[in-house]
Every structure is written in C-alpha cells, then in structure tokens.
Amino acid sequence: MQRLFIIALTLLAIALTACGATTATAPATATKLPAEINVARLKTMLDQNENFFLLDVRTPQEFAQDGRVAQATLIPLQELEQRLSELPTDKPIVCICRSGNRSAAACDLLRSRGYEAVNVAGGMRAWKAAGYPMVVGP
C-alpha cells in the first residue's frame, strides 16, 4: 500500500512539473506570424509599431533608386548568409524584395537557421501599387 502511495505521489509531481513547464515556455499571449503576409498586413504592423525586423533583400541600387519602406534594413540576398549576425534573434524577420521571390528565398534560408521569417507577398511592386509611402534615394 505504501509503495502504491509513493508511485501516485511521484506521478502527481511529474504531472504538475510538466504543466508548469508548458505554461512557462508557451505563454498565452505569444502569437506567431504566418509564413507569408500581404502588404496591407505589413502596413498595419508598421502603423501599430509591432515588434519585428523589416529586411529588404534587393540590391543596393534597387533599394536606393526604386523606393523602399522607410523602416527597412538592406541586406542583399547574396550577402545574407554571411551577415546573419546582424539580424535580431528575439523577434520575427519580415522579408521584402521587388516581387516576393528573393524574399521567399531569404525566408527559407532564415528558417533553416532557426529564425522566424515572414515573406511579403508581391514585394515592393505590391507596396507601390497599394499607394503606401516609399523613400527614394540613399
């Protein structure tokens, strides 16, 4: 009988510990972004000052001459793997390019390295078509 009581207490302790660990690692307020968002969602995120890093993976010429989102940081796709140390690890990285193709490739690379990465569908073409503000020049 005493042995059964000890086993029951042990199982109860394990169950309580597991419940506590689950709550600590997955808070109810944590939200994860989808793998891809549209430009309207990006604009809302910017307007609401959501916590994310906006990464533009186009060339420096495109970034300066074709217009960019003011909050974007440029790291061209061909340099991204060598410059991962410049990226934050504590917030999602939202990737944008001209049309969404290079930024999708950037997201694949980032996810393979453990980052939470989100692609902007349609890229800067869609951003411009929607009439959202852009910065042109260096």
Image (cartoon, rainbow, N blue to C red):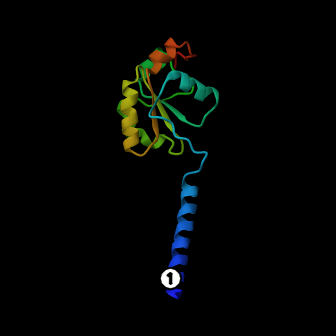
Q: Residues within 10 Å of mark 1 (few under 14, many from 20)?
A: few
Q: Is residue 69 at least partly visible in the picture?
A: no
Q: Pick the residue in front: 27 or 19.
A: 19
Image position, residue 52 (x, y; %): 55, 36
Residue 86 is at least partly visible in this image: yes
Q: Is residue 84 left or right of residue 26?
A: left
Using the image, determine if residue 21 lies above or below residue 73. below
Could you tell me which residue is drawn at 54 percent across and 57 percent down?
22
Q: Could you say where residue 121 lies in the image, as x and y percent from the top left?
A: 44, 24
Q: Nearer the viewer, residue 86 or 20?
A: 20
Q: Nearer the viewer, residue 138 or 98?
A: 98
Secondary structure at badge 1 equals helix
Residue at image coords 53%, 77% = 8
Q: Residue furthest right?
A: 48
> Can you identify the residue that label 1 sits on?
4
Residue 134 lies in quadrant: top right
Residue 41 horizontal/vertical position (percent): 54, 26
The residue lying toward the viewer, choosing from 66 and 126, is 126
Is 95 left or right of 42, judged from the image as shown?
A: left
Identify which amino acid the numbered label 1 is placed on: Leu
Give the number of callouts. 1
Q: Residue at x 37, y 27 (%)?
A: 102
**Which residue is the extreme one toward the front?**
1
Q: Dividing the picture into quarters, in which one does residue 61 lie? A: top left
- Residue 57 in the image, given as x and y percentages of width and height: 42, 28
Image position of 129 with respect to 51: above or below: above
